[in-house]
Image: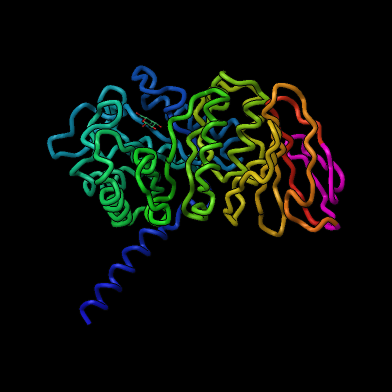
């Protein structure tokens, strides 16, 4: 009898960790790291407030972005007299709670960064031995999203510690998205991704992204090579890292491709640029609601590469209502013709589809059996196929 009760209790604990109700589609928001790094003269209360306003005025909030998130370098160098975390007193003179309140007043949500070790990657106080207290503190401040890094901590202890924090966050009673860096640190060790997906809403698995073509295409390749798509679904997502769109290191075409591929693989869409000064082109990419709708598809099935020939690729994602999203991707240095065929996407050759171009926002006619597209160098053609 005791054993049965124990088993039921364990089952309930796991179920509550799994089903925290959030991130039913990949989280969308903004984070300080990719643009501001650890620049302590930029990371302050005003930055968050101005960015939150810009998220609304630029149309990003309307397009679905929600989270305004601090990454590393927001903390004071010491905990307070009661052992609680505190933000840098000069840069966040009123603390974090009023900022979260303001962000909430705009209809948005707030995210924060910590680390399971005794120090964050940049050397600020970590959460080691304080997981419960820190989870409570975040809940009291009104935090909605916690990114938990894994610097300065033994990989072998991560399973236990990331699990403890998952439970501590749930125990606060506040809904918080839980982003885990554990698999990124455990790259050469065996990680059970079914288990990771049961305690984390999203998880980093590869190296940090940079604002260049090689960085994100190499992450994309690693995601495919390691066959991680099956672990994604509502409430639990692979995290290939945040966006770099608008940071200046790539062409408009490359940023379009980056956004298309991140959407086909159901990646979290966390902008990493300065939202207060965006070009019209950057805004157009980040707020392309037709591409975003692919990323946010309610089925939550992560797309995969279904065709590769030299530098030509075809990526496919199954959408709700029997629709399909397809990305024709040209990695080569010249325009190339990529032919979509029914056998590549595994549909009957006599099945007719209406094809819509999600960047040109218009129909390209019918697709049945085969259709060829010129795709510019480093560019994509992104389609939605609806049964005709
Ligand atoms: C890295 C992490 C980055 C950023 C940085 C902060 O480990 O991958 O996304 O959070 O730490 O120091």
Instruction: State the extent of the magenta-drawn residues as a range.
Output: 350-372
Q: Quadrant of ligand 1?
A: top left
Front residue of 106/382: it is 382
- Asked if the magenta segment contains residue 161, the reply would be no
- Asked if the magenta segment contains residue 354, the reply would be yes
Front residue of 297/110: it is 297
User: Could you say where residue 286 lies in the image, as x and y percent from the top left?
Assistant: 61, 33
User: Could you say where residue 360 lies in the image, as x and y percent from the top left?
Assistant: 77, 35
Side of 208 relative to 61 (left or right): left
Q: Residue furthest left?
A: 81
User: Could you say where residue 178 lies in the image, as x and y percent from the top left?
Assistant: 38, 47
Image quadrant in which the N terminus is located: bottom left
**Which residue is drawn at the image coordinates 46% and 52% (left, top)?**
236
User: Taken as a whole, is the magenta stretch helix, strand or loop?
Assistant: strand
Asked if one can make out residue 4 in the rendered structure from this viewpoint, the answer is yes
Front residue of 33/187: it is 187
Image quadrant in which the C terminus is located: bottom right
| Rendered position, 14 above or below 310 | below
Front residue of 221/75: it is 221
Q: Residue furthest bottom?
A: 1
């Amino acid at each position: 009898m005791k054993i049965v009760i124990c088993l039921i209790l364990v089952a309930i604990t796991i179920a509550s960790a799994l089903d925290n109700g959030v991130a039913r589609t990949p989280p969308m928001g903004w984070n300080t790291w990719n643009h501001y790094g650890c620049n302590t003269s930029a990371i302050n209360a005003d930055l968050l407030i101005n960015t939150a306003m810009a998220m609304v005025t630029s149309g990003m909030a309307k397009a679905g972005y929600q989270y305004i998130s601090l990454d590393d370098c927001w903390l004071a160098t010491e905990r307070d007299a009661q052992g609680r975390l505190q933000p840098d007193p000069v840069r966040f003179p009123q603390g974090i709670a009023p900022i979260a309140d303001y962000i909430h007043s705009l209809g948005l949500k707030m995210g924060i960064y910590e680390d399971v070790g005794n120090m964050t990657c940049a050397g600020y106080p970590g959460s080691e031995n304080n997981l419960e207290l820190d989870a409570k503190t975040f809940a009291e401040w009104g935090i909605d999203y916690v990114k938990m890094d894994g610097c300065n901590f033994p990989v072998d202890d991560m399973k236990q510690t990331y699990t403890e924090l998952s439970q501590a966050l749930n125990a606060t009673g506040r809904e918080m998205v839980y982003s885990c860096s554990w698999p990124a640190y455990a790259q050469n060790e065996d990680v059970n991704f079914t288990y990771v997906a049961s305690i984390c809403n999203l998880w980093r698995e590869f190296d940090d992204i940079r604002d260049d073509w090689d960085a994100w295409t190499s992450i994309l390749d690693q995601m495919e090579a390691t066959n991680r798509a099956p672990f994604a679904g509502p409430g639990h997502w692979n995290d290939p890292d945040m966006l770099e769109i608008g940071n200046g290191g790539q062409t408009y075409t490359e940023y379009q491709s980056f956004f298309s591929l991140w959407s086909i693989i159901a990646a979290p869409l966390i902008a990493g640029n300065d939202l207060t000064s965006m070009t019209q082109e950057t805004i157009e990419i980040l707020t392309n609601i037709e591409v975003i709708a692919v990323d946010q598809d309610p089925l939550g099935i992560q797309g995969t590469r279904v065709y590769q020939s030299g530098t030509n690729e075809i990526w496919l994602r199954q959408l709700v209502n029997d629709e399909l999203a397809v990305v024709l991707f040209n990695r080569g240095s010249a325009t190339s013709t990529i032919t979509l065929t029914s056998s590549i996407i595994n549909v009957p050759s006599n099945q007719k589809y209406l094809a819509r171009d999600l960047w040109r926002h218009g129909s390209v006619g019918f697709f049945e059996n085969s259709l060829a597209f010129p795709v510019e160098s480093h560019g994509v053609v992104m389609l939605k196929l609806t049964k005709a």
